[in-house]
Amino acid sequence: MKHYENKIAFEMDASDLFDALNKKEKIVALDARKSFAFVKEHIPNAINIPHREMNEETTMHLDKEILYVVYCDGIGCNASTKGALNMTKLGFKVKELMGGIEWWKFDGYATEGVASIASSGDIQCAC
């Protein structure tokens, strides 16, 4: 039981993030990939701090009372895990987005950037 409680405490899926953002909860999507990937495509209103650049200086402007949902490309990338670890060490509240931006798009949510996609319009969580 504790294993699953921990998973929910430290991970979030795309539908939960989408709902939290729409409800204007104190939550920010944080893209932990390099800036060229962020420019190409990212979750709407996300901020970008590549995990390799996360430190006291690059995060000093961030509110430590907000939950940061860290993401990367998806299951074949561990930038979100490294970013979540870095942000936690810096004293931030953090969750990792399950499946990254790929599962965000798979669920039909829009992205921003030079290669952005529109919402599929038929967004329904199957879980």
Image (cartoon, rainbow, N blue to C red):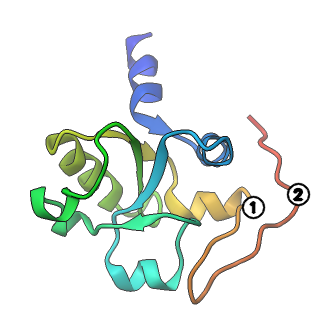
Task: Name the quarter where the C terminus is drawn.
Answer: top right
Number of numbered callouts drawn: 2
- Most extreme residue toward the bottom, as rendered? 114
- Residue 65 location (% of width, % of height): 34, 36
Q: Residues within 10 Å of mark 2 (few under 14, many from 20)?
A: few
**Mark 2 vs mark 1, CA separation in Å:** 7 Å
Left/right of residue 106 with respect to residue 13 in the rendered view:
right
Left/right of residue 1 with respect to residue 104 in the rendered view:
left
Q: Which residue is mark 1?
A: 108
SS type, badge 2: loop
Where is 86 relative to 104, above or below?
above
User: In the image, what residue occupies the spot 63% across and 71% down?
Assistant: 111
Quadrant of residue 116 within the rendered picture: bottom right
- Residue 44 location (% of width, % of height): 59, 66
User: In the image, what residue occupies the spot 46% across and 84% down?
Assistant: 39
- Most extreme residue toward the left, as rendered? 56
Observer-nearest residue: 52 or 126? Answer: 52
Q: Which residue is mark 2?
A: 122
Dot 2 or dot 1: first in sequence order is 1
SS type, badge 1: loop
- Residue 43 location (% of width, % of height): 56, 65
- Residue 118 location (% of width, % of height): 76, 74
User: In the image, what residue occupies the spot 27% across and 55% down?
Assistant: 83
- Most extreme residue toward the top, as rendered? 1
Quadrant of residue 88 within the rendered picture: top left
Observer-nearest residue: 105 or 58? Answer: 58
Observer-nearest residue: 38 or 100? Answer: 38
Please say if the residues under marks 2 and 1 sit with CB atoms less than 8 Å apart: yes
Q: Residues within 10 Å of mark 1 (few under 14, many from 20)?
A: some
User: In the image, what residue occupies the spot 41% across and 65% down?
Assistant: 47
